[in-house]
Amino acid sequence: MKTNIVYVKFGYNREYPYINNQFDLKVGDKVYVNGKCKDQIGTVIEVINQFKASIKHYKYVVQKINFDFHGKFTKCEEFFVSVGEDALPYEQVFSWIKGPSLEEEPGENEFLVCGNGYEIDLNDFDVENCELTKYKNLEDEYCFIKTIEVEFITVKNSVGKAFVYNDDEYSIVEFKIDMKTKKMSNIFCDCLSARLCFDIEAVAIAIITAIKKGVLTDDENFTIIESELFEKIIEEKDLAILI
């Protein structure tokens, strides 16, 4: 890969040069960098191939963001849903929200896993009557769960991962799902609660709502994306939304 210097723009009137030695970049590409703008998506506005630069003065491009995707997305309440082989990989959608983890503390990404995970029968969820039946069965708790922001859920070959915001903290929910029986199993969440937590239930509610609305079928591949996130992404692609 040829090394170059790229100028990257962030928001209004903020552009900085970065060393790129990992990616084939062109003007218009979206990237993450390290340094003070590491949590922001930037746009490449210039690529320079002839230069002499002191490395100590530069930060680096650390990820190129892939906005390419296909398939039919259908509006379902606060989400857009795609079903079938075009379901998006978790890593791709995750990059639309967060950049790669840099300079982590030792042990920060280490997890202690015990047991086979929780199980949920989606048939037990009475979404229309605001009841979680055998799980919580309290309307106020249901309404609280609905305030949790499920950013996206993606399932490939019945194996799913979801990204969830709850009180300014984010968590990742992992699970398996049998769409024929509507049962979730091997469910784990990496939030601070070791119980069957509200984050897990929020993910289950998003899935069962799409099932109840007839948007999800028995297909073992699907993607559910929060509306604001999806609309932000398709602004970059000039696509029509199916409602």
Image (spheres, grey):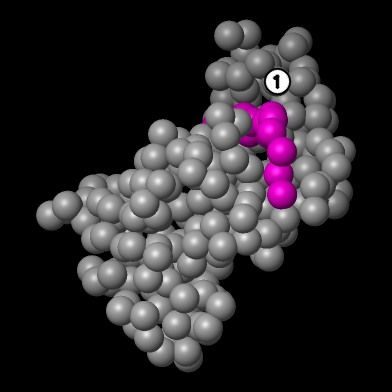
Question: What percent of the width, then of the height, locates residue 229?
Answer: 68, 54
What is the residue that sits farthest to the left in this orientation?
114
Q: Check the image and report above or below for 63 versus 107.
A: above
Q: Which residue is mark 1?
A: 25
Question: What percent of the width, then of the height, locates residue 223?
Answer: 56, 45
Q: Is residue 7 left or right of residue 181?
A: right
Please tell me whether the stretch drawn in magenta is mainly helix, strand or loop: loop
Q: Depth check: 100 or 146 in front?
A: 146
Q: Report the label total.
A: 1
Residue at (76% x, 37% y) in the render: 43
* Amino acid tagged 1: Leu
Q: Depth check: 156 or 63 in front?
A: 156
- 2 in the magenta segment: no
Q: Is residue 82 left or right of residue 145?
A: right
Instruction: Assign the N terminus to one quadrant of the image.
Output: top right
Residue at (23% x, 48% y) in the render: 110
Q: Check the image and report above or below for 16 versus 54.
A: below
Q: Is residue 122 left or right of residue 229?
A: left
**Residue 92 appearing in the image:** no
Q: Is residue 160 left or right of residue 77?
A: left
Residue at (74% x, 12% y) in the render: 49
SS of the residue under disc 1: loop
Q: Residues within 10 Å of mark 1 (few under 14, many from 20)?
A: some
Q: Depth check: 201 or 2 in front?
A: 201
Q: Check the image and report above or below for 212 versus 83.
A: below
Residue at (85% x, 52% y) in the render: 12
Question: What percent of the width, then of the height, locates residue 108?
Answer: 29, 51
Read off the magenta span.
61-74
Residue 86, image quadrant: top right
**Residue 19 appearing in the image:** yes
